[in-house]
Image (cartoon, rainbow, N blue to C red):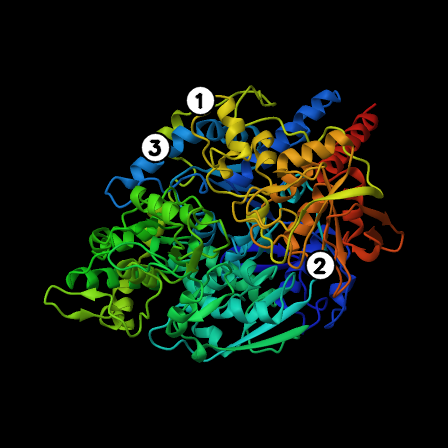
Amino acid sequence: MSTLTVGDREYSFHSLDGIAPDHLPRTLRILLENALRHRTSSDVLRVWEPGVIGELEVHPSRVFLHDTNGVPVLADLAAMRDAMVAQGKDPALVDPLIPAELVVDHSVIADAFGRPDAMQLNVALEYERNAERFRFLRWGQQTYQQLKVVPPGAGIMHQINLEHLARVVEERDGLLFPDLCLGTDSHTTMVNGLGVLGWGIGGIEAEAAMLGQSVSMVLPRVVGVRLTGSLPIGTTATDLVLTITETLRAHGVVGKLVEFGGPALAELPVPDRATIANMSPEFGSTVAYFPIDQQTLDYLLFTGRPVEKVAVVETYARAQGLWHDPAELRYDEYVDIDLTTVVPSIAGPRRPQQRTSLADARRAVEAELPPGRRTVGAPGHGAVVVAAITSCTNTSNPEVMVAAGLLARNAVERGLTSKPWVKTTLSPGSRVVMDYLGDAGLTPYLEKLGFHLAGFGCMTCIGASGALIDSVGEAVRAQDLTVAAVLSGNRNFEGRIQPDVRLNYLASPPLVIAYALAGRMDIDLLTEPLGIDTSGDQVYLADLWPSSADIGAVISQTLKPELFNTAYDDIFVGDDRWQRLEVPDGETFAWGDSTYLQRPPYFDQQAAPGDLIGARALVRLGDAVTTDHISPAGAIPVDSVAGRYLLDLGVTQPNTYASRRGNHLVMMRGAFGNVRLRNQLAQGVEGPTTPGPDGVLTSIYDAAEAYRAAGVPIVVVAGKEYGTGSSRDWAAKGPALLGVRAVLAQSFERIHRSNLVGLGILPLEFQPGEGDDLTGAEPIDIHLGDDGFATAYSAGREYRLKIRLDTPREVDYYHHGGVLPYVLSRLSEESLRGQNGNE
């Protein structure tokens, strides 16, 4: 143990001097300190060289949640308390041992838009729909000692984390250590832009971590990304991150730690870094880490952090080798990115890595459009029907938000308007955004183009986009139009943004406005006019685009630390509606007959692990199946299995899957419920359909129930990158409740594989180049070997699959039926040992 002095205070810390190799990447230095402090194995980090393999146990300093993942987390903990009571033990044994913060940001829907009272109407609907969930969250906050809840309307969790909650360096009882934040949202990585090591984990892993369990992981490979040059005039951080996403997806960084460095870093501000770090899941890495430097300190001061706190961050970072300096670190892999090559871009229509330059965008869009009517005076194929400035990815960045406001001003002054068929929304991740846009006088111009504030929350980015304009939605469905959404978000997966919209494009906030003015995606914004001004002259994007000097002047005049201090002064208090909520009492939760909250069944009898004989494929899926395909988050269609179930219970407003995640009876009916799901067993039918045991097409839920009744085990067969996207634990919970025993895939995304193990589903990975010919149409026999491999037999063919239980801890989880039964068993044993020790 060493000491350091900052001001007149002395602190203790676990020094890495003489322990960590000089060339050790900074992400691994943080993990080494974590191992030393928690007395877990650190040998592999002490002797680290590129290519070294090993295992780690990570203890986060805090856990970060949002409401749609947080509600099931708290529901599982409440069910664990019930299980403790059933065993005659104290329910208070189930209580977080580390700080946990939960932000309510996923519940608000963009129902109202394009009107001054849009936010008020949306928030009122949010409380009307979610009062039961909110009361449950308030019960959790008063029951669990280390849980804090940020009520609705404050902003988006990652932007709040960046601007206020992140410690960078944690101090507890005079001991300093890195702020290691694990969250139930994959974009927890956004805080990497501030020098915080953090990444997304599944909700069940988060529960275990909150109860004192380590997160077990294989030592990842570390990729050093060297940034050089500077962004050309007219490009944005959005263009940069789309370029990085394309580059790193092509390189292959799934499950790896990415560290940024290079000469361009010194001039890259934290908001740009945060935009890049936010999209770490989109390029597949575990983290996208930026080291602590002067830019970090400037941002901490800029956002109102105390001077004394910032001094501690600098002193500790320098002492621990976490400060960015010219010293050459070593990495497993290297990537060079020249910022001067970045050009204005969009990405889509189905994946964030599908970047195309703005110059080539029209050609790329036209390739996606069927023959038929185009958009001229009314929506046709290629019409933009949703234009949303949304998501913390970009709204956390003042440069692109001010650019959007200035472009709106310039457009309005030339007499341009958004096209009437475009649903326009503005949903920033922080109240600070509206404060500085208002102080700059830009809000009225945004509103004249229809970009009224719709709410402070994720909204369109997570599919809570609401319905299209009525007449537009009717035309899209009646004419089977292929229409588009353009949003400043981070994801554009099929069926995610809006069920009637087939094409989804990611773009910077100013480009979102430009496409709203154009009303169509099949336009060359660099050569075609956006409209005609009041003088009859054609107006081009270049005529409206603000200069860097104009953007900088607005930022310097309006953005002050006082804005952040005011916005976050009472962040945990909430408005009158939050305060008036009736909060249940008691150390255990009274479940009742709510359609939002039901006691989870994960502690009931689980299927015994082992060989699977005569298994049938519930679905046979292709490559890049996302967690949105497996467990949708958007509106529950009234004609879906889940929608009909709720209607039978008298529920006339099904709400969203995201809001119903506390009710497994709804969520299991929504598993594989994406309207764009392509199941190769479904004979060309798109959506949640599959053959049952009799070979007749039916809903996936009904097929699973029929297999269960017949005593037939079921599996999922898939291609590469299975489970990409959100850290959605319901993408594992739903299949587990349907009875899925294993997933056979050519490769897995990191978080989803972990979630499968956490629910007792066995991930099995084909050998390279194998698996395409396993159709899933015939029974499958799966035999588990003792060598880490399984053998599958189907239709006369044999397949050797790797059992993806990557650590001894994961083996324990699987044999207990998942994380939660494992943790309950550990807590019960500790309780019993405590009782025996006191006898």
Tell me the element at label 3: helix
Residue 370, label in figure: none
Q: CA distance from mark 1 to mark 3?
A: 17 Å
Q: Earlier in the sequence, mark 1 or mark 3?
A: 3
The answer to whether marks 1 and 3 mark residues whose Cβ atoms lie closer than 8 Å is no
The answer to whether 32 is drawn above or below residue 587 in the figure is below
- Examine the rendered structure and indicate whether residue 372 appears above or below residue 21: above
Nearer mark to the viewer, of 2 and 3: 2
Give how far apart the Cα atoms at labels 2 and 3 are.
46 Å
For numbered disc 2, what is the local secondary structure? loop
| Corner quadrant of residue 486 | bottom left
Q: Nearer the viewer, mark 1 or mark 3?
A: 3
Say what amino acid the circle numbered 3 marks.
Ala
- Neighbourhood count class around disc 2 (C-alpha, 10 Å): few under 14, some 14–19, many 20 upward: many
Query: Observer-nearest residue: 734 or 379?
Result: 379
Q: Which residue is mark 3?
A: 124
Q: Quadrant of the N terminus?
A: bottom right
- Residue at screen point 65% across, 28% down: 79
Contact (Cβ within 8 Å) of mark 1 with mark 2:
no
* Residue 307 appears left or right of 703: left
Left or right: where does residue 583 sit relative to residue 402? right
Image point 63% across, 32% down: which residue?
Answer: 77
Q: Which residue is mark 2?
A: 746
Instruction: Say which amino acid is labelled 2.
Output: Gln
Provide the secondary structure element on which disc 1 rests.
loop
Residue position marked by numbered label 1 in the rendering: 582
The numbered mark, 1 or 2, whose residue comes first in the sequence reads: 1
**Coordinates of residue 52 in the picture (x, y in percent):** 76, 68
Q: Residues within 10 Å of mark 1 (few under 14, many from 20)?
A: some
**Residue type, label 1:** Glu
Vertical relation: 592 (above or below) 251: above
Badge 3 local density, few (<14 within 10 Å), some, or many (20+)?
A: few
